Image (tube, rainbow, N blue to C red):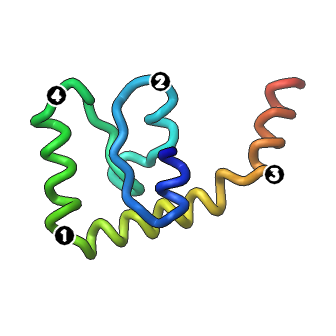
Amino acid sequence: VCLEAAAAGLPVLVGDSGGAPETVRHGDTGWVVDPHNPVAVAARLAPLLADRSAAAAMGSRGRDWVSAEWTWGASVDVLERLLD
């Protein structure tokens, strides 16, 4: 879901657990936050909602990153390295 949002040009806010942090470049394509800390979530979310141009720029960087790095070819390369 996070990669789909980034591919759609949206900035991404994810919790710091599981594989979610791997789907965001913290501070560049979105933010990784403690999901159990509403103050931390609000501190990252409010500026995105208040500054649409900054949010759009972050989303654009996310789209570019997903398009370049999260391709089937890149996934095959990672899998081949892991299987070697």
21 displayed left or right of 70: left
In the picture of the structure, the residue carrying the numbered disc 2 is: 18
Q: Position of residue 23 (x, y in %)?
A: 50, 42
In the picture of the structure, the residue carrying the numbered disc 1 is: 51
Which of the two labelled residues, at mark 3 and mark 2, occupies the earlier sequence position?
2
Pick the residue in front: 58 or 46: 46
Give how far apart the Cα atoms at labels 3 and 4 are: 37 Å
Q: Position of residue 72 (x, y in %)?
A: 78, 50
In the picture of the structure, the residue carrying the numbered disc 3 is: 73
Give the SS element for disc 1. Answer: loop
Residue kind at label 1, given as amino acid type: Asp
1 displayed left or right of 74: left
38 displayed left or right of 12: left
In the picture of the structure, the residue carrying the numbered disc 4 is: 37
Can you say whether 71 is above or below 34 in the image? below
Residue kind at label 2, given as amino acid type: Gly
Pick the residue in front: 39 or 84: 39
Which of the two labelled residues, at mark 2 and mark 4, occupies the earlier sequence position?
2
Q: Given contact means CB atoms under 8 Å apart, are the residues at marks 2 and 1 in contact? A: no
Mark 4 nearby-residue class (10 Å; few <14, some 14–19, many ≥20): few
Give the SS element for disc 4. Answer: loop
Camera-near label (3 vs 2) is 2
Give how far apart the Cα atoms at labels 1 and 4 are: 22 Å
Give the SS element for disc 2. Answer: loop
Give how far apart the Cα atoms at labels 2 and 4 are: 17 Å
Mark 2 nearby-residue class (10 Å; few <14, some 14–19, many ≥20): few
Q: Position of residue 15 (x, y in %)?
A: 34, 32
Which of the two labelled residues, at mark 2 and mark 1, occupies the earlier sequence position?
2
